[in-house]
Amino acid sequence: MKVLVTGGAGFIGSHLMRCLKAHGDEPVALDNLSSGRRENLEEGMELIEMDVRDERLAGVVATGQYDAIVHLAGQTLVSYSLEDPAFDADSNILGIVRVLEAARQSGVKRVVFSSTAAAYGDVPERDLPIKEAHRLAPMSFYGLSKVTAERYLELYHECFGLDYVVLRFANVYGERQGDGGEGGVISIFARNVAEGNEITIFGDGEQTRDFIYAGDIAEGVAAALTTTQANVVYNLSTQTQTSLRELVDVLSNVAGRRIIPKYGPERPGDIYKSSLSNARARRGLGWKPAVSLEEGLRRTYAYFLKKADAS
């Protein structure tokens, strides 16, 4: 299968490119390199340097004769979406429209879209783990733009017959992650520990997240490309709550030394407890997470340690 991966030189995209290649597919990355990096891709992987909002996208997709598109590109920072809602909307809403139009005009069979747990907003602890049918109540323009993109996918299917799969990611972490975006706390902690710096927990440390390794996300996306149960929304998660205190304990084991964090004030707008149900993905995609938090942290820490040693 020939697959165009928008944002393919980014954090999750680079994991997906490797995964698809290992599955025998032909992945091609399309990235404007605003946050992605050429060096994130393995030698020989094709990269088209272009923004998804570029009017030339439809021609590129038509020329490439792709079977499917995985749309990962976009603005991913909750905080930035609150600072600049117009840019967030331009990137995430116009971006999905350009991708869907290119797919429709070029005969692409399926679009797989990366959505987010931020679509749900702050969910009461009694409703955890969150199921896909839960009411959507985003608390940021980032979450809102992702929900809006999901609606575009539904309508393109209804109006034009274009198949889609929406994947709502939990807190993704792994090698090649920057310091921002969902799951960014792990990359911040791992980098600082690797560089010998202190780490700070904002709040009491009992807030929880559903941390999922990027390689598991990539396998879930690969499954979404071939599932017969398309035109559906799936959570990709571990369905496990890990507190920040617990995260520091696991990182201490991985680093081989005791890490004592500093504590700062709770940040306004932060969700306190979070976990997504993955039961539907297990059934509909035949997928389940395979990498434990300790193993995923070991790989992530080793990556940042290597970068610290090289600098």
Image: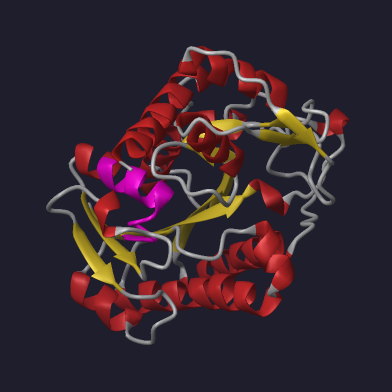
Q: Position of residue 41 (x, y in %)?
A: 25, 51
Nearer to us in this view, 168 or 15: 15
Q: Position of residue 120 (x, y in %)?
A: 75, 49
Vertical relation: 20 (above or below) 34: above
Horizontal side of 191 relative to 140 (left or right) equals left
Report which quarter residue 52 is drawn in.
bottom left
Q: Is residue 49 magenta?
A: no
Residue most extreme to the bottom: 55
Nearer to us in this view, 291 or 131: 291
Nearer to us in this view, 247 or 143: 247
Q: Position of residue 186 (x, y in %)?
A: 56, 35
Q: How is the image coloured?
A: secondary structure
Residue name at image x 75 percent, y 61 percent: 140
Vertical relation: 19 (above or below) 55: above
Residue 243 visible from this viewpoint = no
Residue most extreme to the left: 44
Residue 160 visible from this viewpoint = yes
The magenta-colored residue range is 5-18
Residue name at image x 44 percent, y 38 percent: 214
Q: Position of residue 282 (x, y in %)?
A: 52, 28
Residue name at image x 66 percent, y 80 percent: 86
Vertical relation: 146 (above or below) 199: below
**Quarter occupied by the C terminus:** top left
Horizontal side of 253 relative to 264 (left or right) equals left
